[in-house]
Image: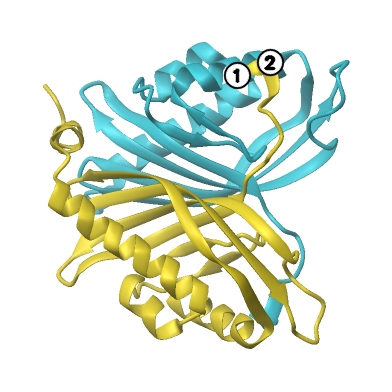
Amino acid sequence: MESNAEASRRIGDDATRQEVLKVHQGYVAASIACDADLLAQVWDPDPSDVHFALSGHTYQGLAHLQQIYGYYRPQLEIDVPCEAFDEDVEVADDVAWVTCSRFGSTRWVGQTPPPLADGPQLYRSTEIMVRGAGGWQVVHSHFSPISQEPRPGDI
Amino acid sequence: MTDDPAFGERSQVLERHAAYLTANNSSSDSALLRRVWDADPNNVYFNMGGHTYHGVEHWSKLWDFYATRIVAPIGYTSYDQRVQVRGDVAWVTCHRYGYSKWIGEEPRRQPDGPRLSRSTEILVRRADGWRTVHVHFSTASNQARPGGI
């Protein structure tokens, strides 16, 4: 007997995938502009939701993320806006997850020591979303750098 | 005893999470890994080295490569686990601590010493139980968060 998750993945409902991709794109747009209001449209309000940032830090809840956006916004210049590619979207009932690679380039113009390296950055992301009464919202995200070295072991 | 109806499901998911760590800490036990991870070759797995792998076969080959090149005096221990179950999907986030040392003859692929990392695992319920369909592992920073947050 197959589970509902298996059935949902095989059916691959295009309309639902497009809804999920739209939220993913909203999240990308919010992070490019460090736009706390746009972020609130795509992030779940549960204060216990976990976000693993590209810097290696962990944040919990929308308020944390909005604070970090507020901190970065006046101190970060964007040379190349972040673009997502190699997106993989999976949907099972009321849960979806999106994995992708991302490229962008930023420059620190703040007075404090830069928390991120300047220049081009290649990284990957995992976003988990849940469908509630108001539609899909992100409940977890994880960003980390991509290695440009060959994979070990000739894999 | 607990009145939480999801307690049993979360326990099953945590058991899978723990089994992965056991497989990883047991000289990279690929046979155990195959009992925890899903068999779909399209599944995406992001490892701590910053590389992307597809399917359990890729990951098993990676473990075979590392098995004779890394020793772990302190195996991975996870903490701050957060388990969510929604229908036939579950996800686990946590921090992990471990200590490893490179013993291979090739140039080292990772620094020796303690490693603090973060982990996201997504599992789906198959006919034979919970199976991991995605992981994302990355290095955690031990610096203060910027912005006084």
The yellow-coloured chain is labelled: A
Q: Image point 63% across, 45% down: which residue? A: A146
x and y, in percent, of residue B87 in the image: 20, 45
Q: Decide if residue A4 is on the left or right side of residue B139.
A: left
Pick the residue in front: A85 or A43. Answer: A85
Q: Quadrant of residue B40?
A: top left
Pick the residue in front: A2 or A143. Answer: A143
Residue beneath disc 1: A155
Chain name for mark 2? B
- Looking at the rendered image, the quarter that the C terminus of chain A falls into is top right
Chain name for mark 1? A
Which scheme is used to colour this image of the protein?
by chain
Q: Secondary structure at mark 1?
A: loop
Identify the disc placed on residue B65.
2
Q: Decide if residue B138 is on the left or right side of residue A90.
A: right
x and y, in percent, of residue A15 in the image: 14, 53
x and y, in percent, of residue A35 in the image: 46, 82
Q: Image point 28% across, 50% down: which residue? A: A96
Q: Image point 50% across, 69% down: which residue? A: A60
Q: Decide if residue A22 is on the left or right side of residue A155.
A: left
The cyan-coloured chain is labelled: B
Pick the residue in front: A29 or B86. Answer: A29
Disc 1, disc 2: CB below 8 Å? yes
Characterize the local packing of mark 1: few (<14), some (14-19) or many (20 or more) Cα atoms within 10 angstroms: few
